[in-house]
């Protein structure tokens, strides 16, 4: 869409796995607030009620005594954890916010009060070409949604009694795909029926638009539904939208014949080499292919927001993206074509990208990409031909793309490896040749645009974890028209390991332009950029904001978070006047602020230049005042632990203790270690995680995976025992996905350290992911000993401590198919290990249904209570072998 950050991946099929771009530009959407990803560092939780929740719920604060056991429930069906945990899960979520383009208005998007019911995710879905489709809605299945929209002045604190509700659409509708018009006068969104009792029948999403001044909404395409399987709609200018609509006159969907018409045949008699990971939901036969084409096809309809006039500008195809040029005069349109594949998902199907005029008239073919089944099985591998096709954010209508010069194979020794091209749309329509903008010797990760005198070019290499950023002047060229080169050579800005987070210079902030795009924020019209970073250090994160001089490479620290707050900067708010210069004096930024006791709130921070020197002072005004979502956790004790592995590697963990708990007074507690391993090329550069896996430059971290993992696990346990926090007889370990894999390995190799384990949605037999997994790009046949030694399935006979396995029975994550847990359970049972397998109906890799989430927490609570807790177990929970009161002490 038009406001995408310059380096955003194109397409909606997972067409190209994102390259490593550790110093990529800050991806700034129209200014708004969104929750960030959860940390993958080690968490150590010492509490009387044990679950994945980082809480001391279920305890009497300060006295270290267990709360009463949960009441017994029915012997079958979904179960619920203790009320203390239930209250945390059912806490109403905070709304999300989006600022208008001129920053004067806040749009508040309310979310459902609780998780969706399992009946919602149990609806029929088609699993086609790596995409799960809701056939009734012509959309992706399992969509989240908003329940209401309201607007308020940005001068008001949110929530505000002065907020005005947007009305006019059917009450009880599910709202998706909300966006501002470029001029901020309208808000577009889709509505759909929830499909509950008394609701209208479920069908395709309908496009609506609201007038911000009146807060009244109206349907924009009455009688037409959208097809949102790949794209939804795009603003072309202030008054025009191009929408992907279900084709008119669409016939019935292809049906599977009652009896097969023949065998399923895959053929490689041409002896081609094709190494692909274990993708889920691939096409199985021609019926699947026909259904994929039926449910994925849309026709493009242009609609005038003011008059409602609409007309079709393109026939039905499998459109994956429609991207308007910044000036609104051109469209960049992408779609998929046959022949489809039974071996790879749709992101690697044949694709075509064309340049059109805004009325749908063809102007030029930009790319015709063939089927890509045979990409090298390397992290830096890429599809041959143009990729990352998009618009220059600082130009009215200029195409840009990257082309690999190594055929997409990172192992080939070539220079340059990638070339970045640009081509004005008008020149492209006239048959003009593309202009070479930059060459990179490593894989190019994209370009961050500023203006004709400045852009940043990113490149990196997975094998060495090296990244570089170059500055260029994109409009300074010389030479013949068809071979014009940059007149000024690129200048190296950064050359570093992207794993070295302690010395991370941060990422440059972007600003909004008058055309609605985002470009690098140049300060005071000089060659200076704002750099925001996490400020990682041995003492934890202290986010910062620096002013970087591109000529001298020197930085000035403008601001840094300091205790007792944890703060982080967000979008620039001083860009309301389009292309007007951004000044350091009076610069306004969104700021997130929280403390150990108080949840994150949004503030507006203003920088003021100190007239007595070169520094700045800051002031802040609070924008949101949300109540604490979990007041029972307000006084939870949290501490960052620092300790060493036996080989000298520094590690950290986050320790959580119940409110009021004093280890010296109350004694040690049952404790769970919850972690997710991360691999680093160099041990010296791995940042502070509890399970850091590193290796010398001539080997990969997985070569010594078991040794490093067990050393990290032992070190963490020794630290919490030394502090008197953890009862050594009641320490358990758990994790999700790769953390589950870690858990099973720790139980196999450290049988005397952990009392029990919880492994959710993991993979345990690496021979079932033979073409690579996680950060391992070598195949099973290249490193059979690594695969075998890392697989806890191969060590099932060594696991004697109780292990709970939880998995969604519809897991679509590559490498963690549900079969992994089923086979692991059979292996453990075959060796007499105390184990339990819980398969959650209809759940994928992450659990979303309320019943599923609560039941998983119930299972975890009961498992740990019996095997590593206080022994408070439901009367009808299956008994297992164990010590007194659930202690697994030997």
Image (cartoon, rainbow, N blue to C red):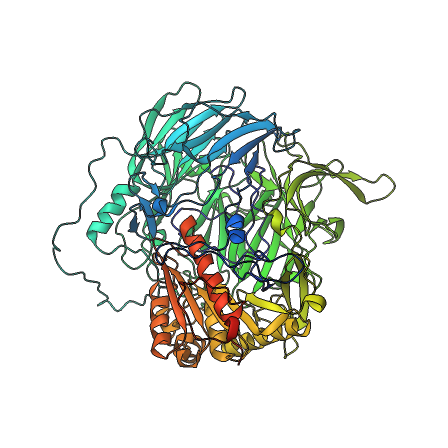
Count the labels in the image: 0
Up-down relation of residue 255 to residue 429 (above or below): below
Residue 278 position, x and y percent, is 35, 63
Q: Quadrant of residue 242?
A: top left
Residue 472 can be seen in this image: no
At a point 42% along the width and 60% down the height, the residue shown is 408
- Front-most of 162 and 585? 162
Q: In screen coordinates, is 543 left or right of 209? A: right
Residue 472 position, x and y percent, is 61, 49
At a point 51% along the width and 41% down the height, the residue shown is 4
Q: In screen coordinates, is 776 left or right of 274? A: right
Up-down relation of residue 876 to residue 452 (above or below): below
Q: Quadrant of residue 213?
A: top right
Up-down relation of residue 654 to residue 227 (above or below): below
Residue 574 position, x and y percent, is 67, 34
Q: Residue furthest right?
A: 612
Residue 517 can be seen in this image: yes
- Front-most of 352 and 661? 661
Residue 763 position, x and y percent, is 41, 67
At a point 50% along the width and 71% down the height, the residue shown is 886
Q: In screen coordinates, is 208 left or right of 628? A: left
- Front-most of 658 and 436? 658
């Amino acid at each position: 869409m038009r406001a995408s950050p310059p380096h955003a991946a194109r397409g909606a099929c997972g067409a190209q796995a994102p390259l490593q771009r550790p110093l990529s530009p800050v991806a700034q959407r129209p200014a708004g607030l969104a929750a960030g990803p959860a940390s993958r560092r080690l968490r150590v939780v010492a509490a009387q009620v044990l679950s994945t929740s980082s809480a001391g719920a279920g305890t009497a604060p300060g006295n270290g005594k267990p709360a009463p056991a949960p009441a017994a429930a029915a012997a079958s069906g979904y179960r619920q954890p203790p009320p203390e945990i239930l209250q945390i899960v059912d806490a109403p979520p905070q709304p999300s916010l989006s600022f208008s383009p001129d920053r004067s208005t806040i749009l508040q998007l309310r979310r459902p009060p609780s998780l969706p019911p399992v009946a919602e995710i149990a609806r029929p879905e088609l699993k086609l070409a790596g995409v799960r489709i809701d056939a009734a809605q012509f959309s992706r299945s399992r969509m989240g949604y908003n329940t209401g929209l309201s607007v308020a002045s940005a001068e008001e604190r949110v929530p505000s009694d002065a907020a005005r509700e947007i009305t006019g659409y059917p009450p009880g509708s599910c709202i998706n795909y909300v966006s501002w018009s470029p001029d901020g006068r309208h808000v577009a969104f889709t509505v759909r029926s929830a499909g509950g009792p008394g609701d209208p029948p479920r069908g395709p999403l309908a496009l609506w638009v609201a007038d911000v001044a009146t807060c009244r909404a109206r349907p924009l395409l009455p009688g037409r539904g959208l097809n949102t399987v790949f794209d939804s709609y795009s603003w072309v200018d202030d008054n025009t939208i191009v929408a992907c609509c279900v084709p008119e006159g669409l016939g019935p969907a292809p049906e599977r014949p009652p009896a097969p018409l023949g065998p399923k045949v895959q053929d490689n008699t041409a002896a081609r080499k094709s190494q692909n990971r274990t993708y889920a939901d691939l096409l199985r036969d021609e019926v699947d292919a026909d259904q994929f084409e039926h449910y994925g096809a849309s026709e493009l309809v242009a609609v005038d927001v003011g008059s409602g006039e609409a007309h079709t500008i393109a026939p039905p195809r499998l459109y994956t993206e429609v991207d308007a040029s910044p000036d609104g005069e051109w469209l960049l349109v992408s779609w998929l074509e046959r022949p489809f594949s039974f071996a790879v998902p749709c992101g690697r199907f044949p694709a075509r990208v064309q340049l059109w005029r805004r009325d749908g008239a063809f102007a030029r073919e930009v790319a015709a990409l063939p089927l890509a089944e045979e990409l090298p099985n390397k992290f830096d591998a890429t599809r041959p031909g143009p990729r990352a096709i998009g618009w220059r954010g600082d130009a009215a209508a200029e195409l840009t793309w990257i082309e690999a010069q190594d055929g997409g194979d990172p192992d080939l020794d070539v220079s340059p490896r990638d070339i970045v091209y640009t081509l004005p749309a008008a020149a492209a329509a006239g048959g003009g040749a593309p202009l070479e903008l930059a060459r990179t010797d490593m894989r190019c990760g994209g370009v961050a645009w500023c203006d004709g005198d400045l852009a940043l070019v990113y490149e990196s290499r997975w094998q060495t974890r090296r990244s570089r950023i170059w500055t260029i002047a994109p409009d300074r060229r010389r030479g013949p028209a068809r071979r014009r080169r940059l007149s000024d050579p690129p200048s190296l800005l950064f050359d570093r390991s992207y794993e070295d987070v302690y010395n991370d210079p941060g990422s440059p902030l972007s600003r909004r332009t008058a055309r609605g795009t985002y470009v690098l924020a140049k300060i005071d019209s000089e060659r200076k950029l704002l750099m925001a970073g996490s400020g990682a250090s041995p003492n934890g994160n202290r986010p910062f904001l620096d002013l970087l001089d591109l000529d001298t490479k020197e930085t000035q620290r403008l601001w840094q978070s300091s205790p007792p707050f944890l703060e982080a900067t967000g979008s620039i708010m001083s860009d309301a006047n389009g292309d007007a210069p951004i000044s350091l004096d009076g610069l306004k930024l969104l700021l997130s602020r929280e403390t150990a006791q108080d949840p994150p709130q949004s503030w507006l921070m203003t920088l003021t230049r100190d007239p007595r020197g070169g520094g700045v002072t800051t002031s802040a005004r609070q924008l949101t005042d949300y109540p604490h979502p979990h007041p029972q956790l307000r006084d939870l004790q949290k501490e960052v632990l620092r300790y060493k592995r036996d080989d000298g590697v520094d590690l950290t963990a986050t320790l959580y203790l119940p409110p009021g708990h004093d280890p010296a007074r109350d004694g040690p507690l049952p404790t769970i270690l919850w972690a997710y391993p991360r691999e680093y090329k160099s041990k010296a550069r791995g940042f502070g995680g509890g399970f850091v896996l590193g290796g010398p430059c001539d080997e990969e971290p997985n070569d010594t995976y078991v040794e490093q993992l067990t050393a990290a696990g032992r070190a963490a346990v020794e630290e919490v025992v030394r502090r008197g926090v953890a009862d050594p007889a009641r320490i358990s370990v758990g994790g999700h996905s790769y953390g589950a894999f870690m858990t099973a390995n720790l139980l196999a190799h450290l049988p005397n350290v952990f009392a029990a384990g919880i492994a959710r949605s993991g993979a345990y037999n690496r021979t079932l992911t033979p073409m690579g997994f996680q950060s391992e790009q070598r195949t099973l046949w290249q490193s059979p000993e690594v695969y075998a030694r890392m697989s806890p399935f191969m060590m099932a006979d060594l696991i004697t401590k109780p292990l709970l396995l939880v998995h969604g029975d519809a897991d679509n994550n590559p490498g963690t198919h549900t079969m992994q847990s089923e086979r692991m359970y059979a292996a453990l049972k075959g060796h007499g290990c105390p184990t339990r397998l819980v398969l959650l109906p209809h759940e994928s890799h992450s659990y979303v249904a309320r019943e599923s989430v609560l039941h998983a927490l119930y299972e975890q609570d009961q498992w740990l209570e019996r095997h590593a807790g206080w022994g408070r177990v439901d009367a009808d929970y299956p008994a297992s072998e164990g010590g007194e009161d659930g202690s697994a002490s030997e």
